[in-house]
Amino acid sequence: MIAEEYNKKGDINNAIKYSKKTLALFNEINDDIYVAEIENNLGKLFCEFENIEESFIHLNKAKELRKTIQDSRLTETLISICENYIKLKDVVNSKKALEEIMESIKDGDHKSLVEYYILKYRVDMLQGDIREAESTILTALNFVKNMDYKKETAEIAIMLGKFYIDSGREGEAAQYLNCGVEIFKELGILKQS
C-alpha cells in the first residue's frame, strides 16, 4: 500500500493523505475488513504524529468494525487504544482497555498476552502500584521464558532490570540486565565483546 511506504519513509503527511483516499475507496465498495484495517492504521499513524484525539477517532472506528465482523485483529486495535490512554496518563480508561484486551485474547494468542502483561505493567507503574507492577513484569518474564520467546525474554529482563534500578535494588537489577544483554548477544542483536 502506498500509505505504508510513505510511513516507512517517515513522510507522515503523505501516508495520512493516501490512507484517507484508500479509506474512501474501500468505504465505497463496502469492504469492512479493509476499512477496519485502514482505520486501525490511520489510528496508529496519528498516534505516531502525536495527534491522540484523531488517533482515537480512527481506532474506535476500527474497534467497532472489528467487533461487528468478529475480526481476529480486534486485540491489536485494543492494544493501540490502551497505549493512547497510557500516553495520556489516563489510568481509569487504561484499565478499561486492559479489561477489553483480556476479554478479546483468544486461546493460543500468546503474543497478545505478552503485550497485555507489558501494558498492565505500564498501567501499574502509572498508578504507582510498585508491588503489582513487579508481580506483573515477573509474570510476563516467566511466561516468555516458558514459551521460549528469546527476544521478548531479553526485552522484559531489561525492563525488569530498569525497574529494579529505579527501586534501588542494584543486585537484582544487574542480574536481569545481564540476562537481557546475554540473550541479545546470543541472538546477534548485540555484538560479543
Image (tube, grey):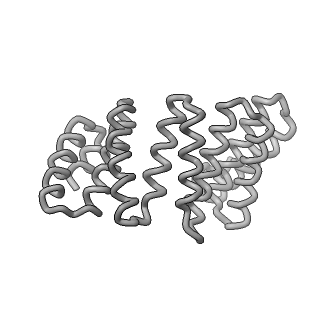
At 67% across and 52% down in the image, what residue appears?
A: 154
Horizontal side of 117 relative to 46 (left or right) equals right
Horizontal side of 163 relative to 54 (left or right) equals right
Horizontal side of 132 relative to 95 (left or right) equals right
At 12% across and 57% down in the image, what residue appears?
A: 28
> Most extreme residue toward the bottom, as rendered?
108
Query: How many badges with numbers are in the image?
Result: 0
Question: Where residue 127 sits in the image (x, y, percent)?
Answer: 68, 31
Give the quadrant of residue 177.
top right
Q: Which is more toward the observer, 98 or 83? A: 98
> Most extreme residue toward the front, as rendered?
68
Question: Where residue 34 sits in the image (x, y, percent)?
Answer: 26, 60
At 65% across and 60% down in the image, what residue appears?
A: 150
For the N terminus, which image quadrant? bottom left
Horizontal side of 43 relative to 119 (left or right) equals left
At 75% across and 54% down in the image, what residue appears?
A: 139
Q: Which is more toward the observer, 39 or 168? A: 39
Question: Where residue 149 sits in the image (x, y, percent)?
Answer: 64, 63
Question: Where residue 22 sits in the image (x, y, percent)?
Answer: 17, 52
Above or below, comparing residue 79 to residue 87 in the picture: below
